[in-house]
Amino acid sequence: MNDSEPTPSDQSDPFDNSKAPKSSWWRLLESSGGTALITVLLGSVGGAWISGIIQNGQKDREFQQSWLKARGDQALVAYKDYLDKQQDIVKRVYERIGTSISASDDLISLSRPEFALPHSESEQKVKMRKYREEIREKYNTSEREWRNEQETLGFLVDYYYPKQNNVLTAWQELAERVTAYYSCANQWLKDHPITDESDSACKQEKEAFSSSLNELTKALEEHRTYAWEGWESPKDLKLALEKKD
């Protein structure tokens, strides 16, 4: 055996990097300080990433909350406006009906003896003629306005009381009774220029009108809503808004 030949244990592995010189960055990473540095860097990056996710989530929630609040405020304003207009149309209906019945009653009253024209020409006759003309003009104007507004009022009642058929039905019945009373008053005066029986004029039509008016009042009372109802409860407000639609 030749002593100059290297033994297997003395042979070096060309692929063994354990004894290769290491870079300064590698030595730094293997040191305890390098480990701490890596921990700090990863913690900073990871913390910033997590913080970004949380902040984005908070922004989304804040946007959703602001959006919901804006929609809620808008809904409340629209709901109150709706109720205000609903009350306005009810007021308008009753005012028109009141004017109609009053004008018809006044026309019927001209058949009473105390409103007859004196036979002789006098100042009293002039005043009485003027009074009768005013009553007739009031009736004609009221009847004309009723014919012009009747359909419009019906449309508004239907619009502001949607899906509430008893209200619309009561209104339609009442409108027919008002028209009938107008016609009866006019015909009564033609048939009874002067009579002691004016108190019994159009009695049947007047009773039918009063009954229909009561039915409309009951129907409106059943569906009456106040602006403050539901504000304290989102669920109740939602149901009220759905009912309106």
Image (cartoon, rainbow, N blue to C red):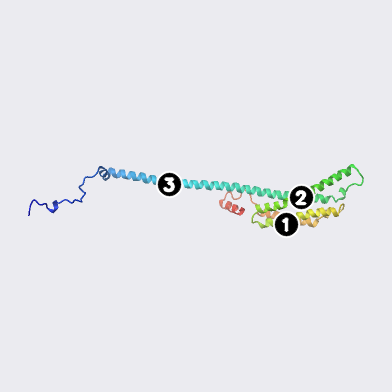
Q: Which residue is mark 2?
A: 144
Classify mark 2: helix, strand or loop: helix
- Crowd rating for badge 3 (residues with CA inside 10 Å; few <14, some 14–19, many 20+): few
From this viewpoint, is residue 107 visible? yes
- Crowd rating for badge 1 (residues with CA inside 10 Å; few <14, some 14–19, many 20+): some
Classify mark 3: helix, strand or loop: helix
Q: Earlier in the sequence, mark 3 or mark 1?
A: 3
Q: Quadrant of the N terminus?
A: bottom left
The percent position of residue 235, horizontal first and vertical second, equals 56, 53
- Crowd rating for badge 2 (residues with CA inside 10 Å; few <14, some 14–19, many 20+): few
Task: Kindly identify the residue that appears in the image at 72 percent across and 50 percent down.
Answer: 94
* Mark 2 and mark 1: Cα distance apart in space: 19 Å
Classify mark 1: helix, strand or loop: helix
Q: Nearer the viewer, residue 177 or 16?
A: 16
The percent position of residue 66, horizontal first and vertical second, equals 52, 46
Q: Which residue is mark 3?
A: 54
**Residue 65 horizontal side relative to residue 111, left or right:** left
* Mark 2 and mark 3: Cα distance apart in space: 70 Å
**Residue 191 horizontal side relative to residue 225, left or right:** right
**Residue 84 horizontal side relative to residue 41, left or right:** right
How many numbered marks does the figure carry? 3
* Mark 3 and mark 1: Cα distance apart in space: 64 Å
